[in-house]
Image: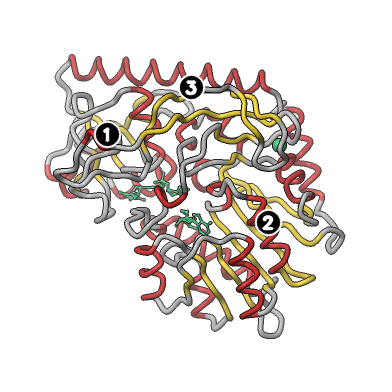
Amino acid sequence: MSNQSLCRVCGGTVREFFDFGRQPLSDAFLPPGADLGEEFFYRLATGLCESCTMVQLMEEVPRERMFHQEYPYHSSGSAHMRGHFEELAKRLLTTELAGDDPFVVEVGCNDGVMIKALAEAGVRHLGVEPSGGVADLAAAKGIRVRKSFFEESTAKEIRAADGPADVVYAANTLCHIPYIGSVLSGVAALLAPTGVFVFEDPYLSDIVEQTSFDQIYDEHFFFFTVRSVQAMAAGHGLELVDVERLPVHGGEVRYTLAHAGARRPSPAVAELLAEEDARRLGELDTLRRFGENVLRIRDDLTALLRRLRAEGKRVVAYGATAKSATVTNLCGIGPDLVEFVCDTTPAKQGRLTPGTHIPVVPPEEFSRSYPDYALLFAWNHAAEIMAKEQAFTDSGGQWILYVPSVRTV
Ligand code: DWN
Ligand code: SAH
Ligand code: ZN
């Protein structure tokens, strides 16, 4: 165990600020009959690079362990997210992709939730997606998909075969890639001189502000800020030219990079940077305070669940999110405290949650006989889920939330 590592962006020293301990892979739901003794664990801990301020995991999980044929997350599972991506696709069609014969590449297209709209509009496109099962779902929607990890070699092959890209896009994917230098070299090689690299990921500022510590798990290797993204871009002849805060997944930022000097940066970049400095996001003290808040939430949540069990209340959970692996494993929440987790994803149903072995069941189990409390693991989809499950609260049921603090509603 080491409380120091080398920055995957700049090679500087990364100092650890929080240790979540031994954790399983967040999306490794166990099939019936799985050997529970065979589960893979790693140490989940976060650190801050003292040179470029990039917040990152101290340990990397090999990518093939996480992203493979059975990767269970289907991006199209939320109506709200489908709308979010359709809106972006529409915007790209009238801006960056409005020229003659544009070409767009999506890194981590998953089941095609975003690129589908561009494909349907007849835009020349390519989705790059290493997880075979979800890549097949995208292909079945008529999307041109390449089943591989995007990195420098992939990017160069694409450029040679298809020519330069006007847009390279990645949602909730760039932060998953520890070998980010290779990806950025690839993007720089693939982009047309006037092209843009647009990516959106959870924003460190929102995570710290709301103590949304469950955004931290094996797949989320980096936690970006304007400052750290600027440093990362500069190392590859790229420049941050625009930022936009997004309300999805608990708070994200959409970053736009262009070749250095190709575009004039929008004032939004300097504005958000000033906000980050005022919040002291690049300082260890701020992040250590975040760690103290995590422990407070852990203690409050376990105390509440134990009290409800002692009172004989029925408690279930809603949404077998990747995020919830961090919550259940940090807090020690197993089937003794939570009867089951319901989830719409067929590939998760009938399985057990990683590390804590809570059964995952279809949503019908939830409505069959409403519990007293439902722990909302998919809190980032609260509006969508609470509207859909109005009958639960009408029956007297209450939601348990833990971001930004533990409470029932
Ligand atoms: O970054 C990532 C994001 C985009 O997706 C990946 N590393 C993995 C994954 O993270 P997650 O699993 O935490 O994402 P979500 O979108 O919070 O997952 C929601 C889960 O809840 C899914 O399993 C689907 C389920 N769900 C449901 O059962 N009923 C979702 C909705 C909206 C519902 O109504
Ligand atoms: N863009 C979708 C998917 C996010 S999940 C959304 O926003 O909902 C992250 C996805 O990144 C997974 O589908 C995973 O297989 C993919 N991924 C991981 N590493 C990758 C890489 N090097 N290149 C391309 N995709 C990658
Ligand atoms: Zn660094």
Q: Is residue 334 above or below residue 65?
A: above
Which numbered circle lies on residue 184? Answer: 2
Q: Badge 3: few (under 14), some or many (20 or more) residues near its Cα, within 10 Å?
A: many
Labels 2, 1: front one: 2
Spatial CA span between label 2 and label 1: 42 Å
Above or below, 281 relative to 311: below
Position in image of residue 8 (x %, y %)? 64, 41
Q: Is residue 11 above or below residue 104?
A: above
Q: Is mark 2 within 8 Å of ligand 2?
A: no
* Mark 3 or mark 2: whose residue is earlier in sequence: 2
Q: Which quadrant holds residue 23?
A: top left
The percent coordinates of residue 185 (x first, y second) are 70, 58
The amino acid sitting under disc 2 is: Leu
Element assignment for label 3: helix
Cα separation between marks 3 and 2: 32 Å
Q: Nearer the viewer, mark 3 or mark 2?
A: 2
Q: Secondary structure at mark 1?
A: strand
The three-letter code of the residue at mark 1 reads: Ala
Q: Amino acid at mark 3?
A: Val
Q: Position of residue 26 (x, y in %)?
A: 38, 40
In the displayed structure image, the side of residue 338 where residue 125 appears, left or right: right
Q: Which mark is residue 374?
A: 1
Point 34% across, 37% down: residue: 40
